[in-house]
Image (spheres, rainbow, N blue to C red):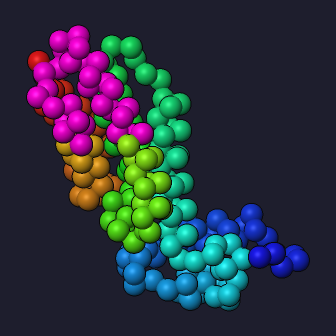
C-alpha cells in the first residue's frame, strides 16, 4: 500500500513500533488491538496498515529487530581471546544489553507463541545464532581445560536463562547497581563452569 502524500513514515513508523512494544509488553499481544496501538500513536486505525500488514507482522518485526540488534551489538563488542575472559565479557554484555531493553526482552520470551510457524522458525534461527556464540565460548574453555561441563548445550541454555532472569526482578535505584549485578553474575557463572 502506498503512503499518503505528506505523511512522515520516518516518524510515524517508529512511533507505531514503540507504542506496540510498550502495549504488548504491558498487556500481552493477544489483549492489544490495532485500534489501541493507533490511539496510542494518535492516528486512525486504518493508517497502521500503511506500515504493517497485520498485528502479527508487527510483533514479528519487533522480535526480529531485537534479535538482529542483539547479534550486531555482540559482534561489535571487544572479545578477549582467552575463554574465561570472553565468558566474562559475554555475561556483562548480556546483562547490560538486556537491562536497557526490558520490554523487548520480555516480548522475546513471552510472545513467541503468537507467531505463525514460519515466523517462529525465523526468530528461532536468530536466537540459535546468539546461543551459538555462548556455546562456542564454553566449548573453547572446555577444550583448554578451564571449564568442566557435562553438556555444553544445556549449560548454554541455563546461563542465558539465568542472565535474562535479571530483567524480572531488577529495578533501577534498588539495592544493587547494574555494575554490581554484572560482577555478581560473572562470579556465579564462573563458578558454574569451573573445571
The stretch of residues the image draws in magenta is: 129-157
Q: Quadrant of the N terminus?
A: bottom right
Front-lying residue, 83 or 139: 139
| SS majority, magenta | helix
Q: Is residue 175 above or below residue 80?
A: below
Front-lying residue, 112 or 35: 112
Q: Is residue 7 rendered to the left or right of residue 178? A: right
Q: Is residue 98 above or below residue 147?
A: below
Q: Residue at x 11, y 28 (%)?
A: 150
| Residue 151 part of the magenta segment | yes
Q: Is residue 91 rendered to the left or right of residue 40? A: left
Residue 81 % position (x, y): 39, 14
Residue 15 % position (x, y): 63, 70
Q: Looking at the image, how many numbered discs can be counted on the residues?
A: 0
Q: Is residue 18 visible?
A: yes
Residue at the front extreme of this rendering: 118
Q: Is residue 90 rendered to the left or right of residue 63? A: left
Front-lying residue, 173 or 25: 25
Residue 43 location, quadrant: bottom right
Residue 58 % position (x, y): 55, 70
Q: Residue at x 26, y 59 (%)?
A: 168
Q: Residue at x 54, y 54 (%)?
A: 65
Residue 54 % position (x, y): 58, 77
Q: Quadrant of the C terminus?
A: top left
Amino acid at each position: 500500500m502506498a503512503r499518503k502524500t505528506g505523511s512522515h513514515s520516518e516518524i510515524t513508523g517508529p512511533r507505531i513500533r514503540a507504542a506496540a512494544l510498550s502495549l504488548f509488553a504491558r498487556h500481552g499481544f493477544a489483549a492489544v488491538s490495532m485500534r489501541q496501538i493507533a490511539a496510542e500513536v494518535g492516528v486512525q486505525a486504518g493508517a497502521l496498515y500503511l506500515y504493517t500488514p497485520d498485528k502479527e507482522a508487527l510483533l514479528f518485526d519487533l522480535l526480529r529487530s531485537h534479535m538482529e540488534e542483539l547479534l550486531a551489538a555482540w559482534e561489535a563488542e571487544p572479545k578477549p581471546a582467552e575463554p574465561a575472559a570472553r565468558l566474562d565479557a559475554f555475561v556483562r554484555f548480556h546483562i547490560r544489553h538486556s537491562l536497557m531493553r526490558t520490554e523487548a526482552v520480555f516480548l522475546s520470551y513471552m510472545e513467541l507463541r503468537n507467531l505463525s510457524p514460519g515466523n517462529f522458525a525465523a526468530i528461532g534461527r536468530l536466537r540459535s545464532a546468539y546461543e551459538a556464540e555462548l556455546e562456542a565460548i564454553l566449548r573453547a574453555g572446555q577444550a583448554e581445560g578451564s571449564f568442566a561441563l557435562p553438556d555444553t548445550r544445556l549449560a548454554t541454555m541455563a546461563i542465558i536463562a539465568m542472565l535474562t532472569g535479571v530483567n524480572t526482578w531488577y529495578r533501577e535505584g534498588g539495592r544493587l547497581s547494574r555494575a554490581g549485578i554484572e560482577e555478581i553474575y560473572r562470579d556465579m557463572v564462573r563458578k558454574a563452569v569451573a573445571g
